[in-house]
Amino acid sequence: MKQRMIESIEGLQRTEGGHILYYFRDIERYADNVVAFILSNVKLEHHILIIENDKITPLIRNKLKPLIIEEQWNYVHFINNFDFYFTYGDFHEAAILSYFMKIAQPYLDNGTSLRAWSHVEWGHLDTTACLIERVEKMADEQTSALGLTLVCAYEVDRLPDTMKDTLVKHHQFIMTDEKIISTDQ
């Protein structure tokens, strides 16, 4: 992992929340960045929800295993992204928010710092563009209201060009495999 990326992620963790759009291309670098996100949060004793698919979760766990001690695993919570986005059958933004709040509420009620990383995957992203925009708008509002840091990760090669501008307007930061920038820049 590049030290500069780790420092950028750590800097974001000290803020009062933020909504980060991550366009990734390389699965290995993506997993390294998830691990950097986890490490920076564990160091600050934040709880982390990692909403990820069954293929990438073992890769992340294996990279993380030699880097944290047993007690620190208590801060890391993995959720299958398919289960998360399709818990109530078809995709619906109210159901996603309800499920997220069901998971997050115990941490929020206890005043526990909570961060989330979500790998967003839907069959054909071009056919669900308006649905994704509504979810991202809702997520942007919730991250602000709750003071959460949320990373929404999309595989850039599967993302239609028409969606990129739409997604940017609902995030404060854009992240790639190599860098993080503010959308205000």
Image (cartoon, rainbow, N blue to C red):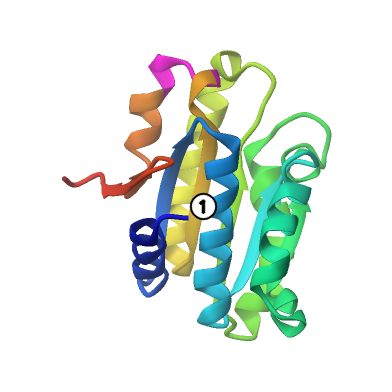
In the rendered image, residue 53, in percent from the top left (x then y), is placed at 74, 41
Q: Give x and y (percent) for residue 93.
A: 63, 39
**Which residue corresponds to the image point at 45% horizontal and 41% vertical from the top-left?**
22
Please give the name of the residue rendered at 67% of the width and 63% of the height, measured from the top-left corner.
64
Task: Name the spot of residue 35 as percent of width and height, x first.
Answer: 58, 59
Nearer-the-camera pick, 167 or 61: 61
* Secondary structure state at the residue bearing disc 1: helix
Q: Which residues are magenta?
A: 158-163
Look at the image and say whether residue 173 sits in the magenta stretch: no
**Residue sticking out furthest to the left:** 185
Count of labels in the image = 1
Q: Is 101 drawn above or below residue 174 in the view shown?
A: below
Position of 49 with respect to 160 (left or right) is right
Q: Is residue 82 left or right of residue 134?
A: right
Q: Report the residue marked by disc 1.
A: 33
Q: Is residue 164 above or below residue 99?
A: above
**73 vs 183, nearest the viewer:** 73
- Can you say which quadrant of the picture contains the C terminus? top left
